[in-house]
Image (cartoon, rainbow, N blue to C red):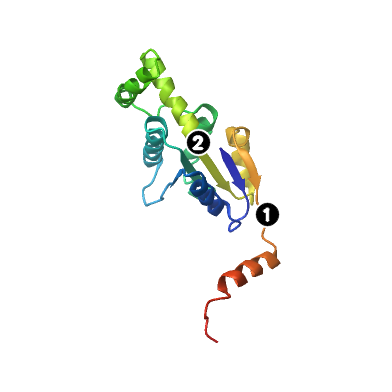
């Protein structure tokens, strides 16, 4: 898990997408729409848990500070980073369905297919295969307050600080990409 910290436009999300491509990980980012709230966020998390825990696929969940429309999102991510679980996310019938679906995999590992072993196998799959990348801006008080309020954002992530690009680097990159284009006069 990682936390990318830098001002907007410094390449945090671009680098995350590139790293996912290089590692052949699936990339996921929530899509904010009108009415998107805790219920929709948890449904997205459940889909990620299924991909990582049941299908055993490597998946990256990229979450930015601009997507924090409810501080409960950060509480869920704090729990996820700390323990691999989000308390209360699954109803009893959903949990039973997961346990039933993962039971053949648990048996293939030679483990006893008890409820606890099945659930811990699912959660271990989530821990092993779900990679959370937080993209945050250090500007303002919100970043500091969130880091104090949700300590797993700091304690359970590798932190990568991004500096502003120097003017010469911006010019060099733009020249390289635009040098062969006919931009008219």
**Side of 55 relative to 137 (left or right):** left
Residue 56 shows in this picture = yes
Quadrant assignment for the N terminus: top right
Quadrant assignment for the C terminus: bottom right
Disc 2 target residue: 77
| Residue 163 numbered tag | 1
Residue 142 shows in this picture = no
Q: Residues within 10 Å of mark 2 (few under 14, many from 20)?
A: many
Disc 1 is placed on an element classified as loop
Disc 2 is placed on an element classified as helix
**Sequence-earlier tag: 1 or 2:** 2
Q: Which picture quadrant has residue 154?
A: top right
Q: Which picture quadrant has residue 43?
A: top left
Which x, y percent locates residue 125? 44, 28
How many angstroms separate mark 1 from mark 2 (CA)?
A: 25 Å
Q: Residue 162 or 173: which is nearer the viewer? A: 173
| Residue 70 numbered tag | none
């Amino acid at each position: 898990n990682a936390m990318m910290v830098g001002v907007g436009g410094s390449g945090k999300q671009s680098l995350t997408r590139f790293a996912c491509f290089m590692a052949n990980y699936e990339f996921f980012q929530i899509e904010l729409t009108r009415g998107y709230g805790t219920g929709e966020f948890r449904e997205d998390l459940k889909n990620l848990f299924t991909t990582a825990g049941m299908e055993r696929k490597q998946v990256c969940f990229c979450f930015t500070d601009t997507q924090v429309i409810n501080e409960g999102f950060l509480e869920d991510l704090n729990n996820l980073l700390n323990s691999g679980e989000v308390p209360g996310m699954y109803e009893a019938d959903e949990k039973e369905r997961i346990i039933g679906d993962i039971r053949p995999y648990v048996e293939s590992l030679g483990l006893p297919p008890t409820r606890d072993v099945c659930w811990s196998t699912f959660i271990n799959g989530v821990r092993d295969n779900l990679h959370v990348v937080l993209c945050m801006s250090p500007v303002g008080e919100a970043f500091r307050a969130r880091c104090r309020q949700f300590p797993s954002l700091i304690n359970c992530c590798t932190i990568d600080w991004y500096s502003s690009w120097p003017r010469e680097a911006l010019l060099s990159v733009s020249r390289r990409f635009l040098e062969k284009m006919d931009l008219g006069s």
